[in-house]
Structures are given as structure tokens and as C-alpha cells.
């Protein structure tokens, strides 16, 4: 499996993060999700899932920051378009990001159950996107927590790819 993102010189373009124009933000948070192209999926793939995290947030917040969690993307949809996170017609369910946690305490589903783009406060951060080819559709619903996702994928991962990229402070 191969995963391609619009990375330029190691960085995610600004329109998907902290320096996004206002029309690409929701409640002052970057909300325009980036396109993802997936090729060479295992033949047995039933669904695709993805998780985007920021481990460089640990010194700032005390934990890995969850930016995006999405699952049950049909294996036939290998081109995830820009802004798929806000496009309710795109076939996927989305889990909670870290703005739903106790540190921020947001409650608006349009913020907490969508892509929440990079906003590194202290330095350029390294982000990781994990893409999973799964042999099943997961028994999850919109608003699932990441730990529920990890339990649900046990024994169902056909292949996993990690793509790292940076975002500017």
C-alpha cells in the first residue's frame, strides 16, 4: 500500500494548518482536510481508516494530540478529496479529535468530530498520518474515541502505512 499527500519540502501546505485563510477555518481552527491518495491496497481490503497525530505536542499538552480519526472508508474510495472531513456526502465516520478532551473541552460536533489542522504553538511539529487497510467495516459510530478505534482494529489490519510531515509554528 502506498499513500500520497500534498507535502512540499517535507511540510504540509499552510492552507491545511495554522496559516489557513479564514474560509478554511471553523471556530478559528484549521478545518480544510488535505487530499490523500491510496494505491496498491491489499486485495482483501474492505475498509480504510486513518489517524493523524502530533507526538511533538507531548511537551506542550502532556499527551499526543489527535488531529483526525476516520474509519469505514470503502476500499473503492482510494482518492480522499480535499475537505472530505467537512463533506457529509463522503462515505466515512469520524472520531473525536483532542479538542473534545478535557484540556480544551469543546463540544461542537462540527469541531470535535472532524479534521482539526496543525497549529504548533512552540516550534515546527512533526505529524504522523497512519492509514490502515482493514479486512472489515468497524462497529463504530461518529464520535468514537481513538482507544475504541484501536480496540476495534485488533486482528483486522491487513496493512498499515505511516506518513510523516511537518507543519510550521
Image: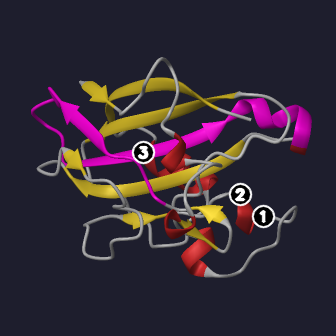
Give the magenta range: 32-60
Which quarter of the rendered picture does the N terminus lie within? top left
Q: Residue at 13% across / 37% down in the picture?
A: 44
Kindly state the secondary structure of the residue where label 1 is placed.
Answer: loop
Residues at circles 2 and 1 in contact by the CB criterion of under 8 Å: yes
- Residue 52 sits inside the magenta stretch: yes
Q: Is residue 94 above or below residue 18?
A: below
Image location of residue 100, percent across then percent down:
72, 68
Numbered circle sitting on residue 98: 2
- Residue 2 sits inside the magenta stretch: no
Image location of residue 162, percent across then percent down:
45, 25
Say which residue label 3 marks: 50
Numbered circle sitting on residue 93: none
Image location of residue 93, percent across then percent down:
39, 66
Residues at circles 3 and 1 in contact by the CB criterion of under 8 Å: no
Residue nearer the viewer, 49 or 57: 57
Residue nearer the viewer, 48 or 5: 5
Q: Quadrant of residue 74?
A: bottom left
Q: Residue at 63% across / 52% down in the picture?
A: 147
Give the side of residue 131 with respect to residue 117, left or right: left
Mark pair 3, 1: CA separation: 19 Å
Q: Residue at 31% across / 58% down in the picture?
A: 72
Say which residue label 1 marks: 101
Amino acid at each position: 500500500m502506498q499513500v500520497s499527500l500534498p507535502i512540499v519540502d517535507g511540510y504540509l501546505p499552510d492552507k491545511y494548518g495554522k496559516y489557513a485563510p479564514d474560509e478554511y477555518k471553523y471556530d478559528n481552527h484549521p478545518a480544510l482536510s488535505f487530499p490523500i491518495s491510496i494505491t496498491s491496497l491489499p486485495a482483501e481490503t474492505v475498509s480504510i481508516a486513518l489517524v493523524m497525530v502530533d507526538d511533538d505536542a507531548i511537551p506542550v499538552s502532556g499527551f499526543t494530540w489527535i488531529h483526525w480519526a476516520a474509519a469505514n472508508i470503502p476500499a473503492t474510495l482510494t482518492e480522499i478529496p480535499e475537505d472530505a472531513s467537512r463533506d457529509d456526502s463522503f462515505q466515512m465516520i469520524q472520531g473525536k479529535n483532542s479538542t473534545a478532551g478535557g484540556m480544551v473541552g469543546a463540544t461542537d460536533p462540527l469541531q470535535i468530530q472532524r479534521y482539526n489542522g496543525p497549529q504548533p504553538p512552540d516550534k515546527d511539529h512533526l505529524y504522523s498520518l497512519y492509514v490502515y487497510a482493514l479486512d472489515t467495516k468497524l462497529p463504530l459510530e461518529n464520535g468514537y474515541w481513538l482507544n475504541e478505534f484501536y480496540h476495534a482494529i485488533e486482528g483486522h489490519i491487513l496493512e498499515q502505512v505511516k506518513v510523516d510531515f511537518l507543519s510550521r509554528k
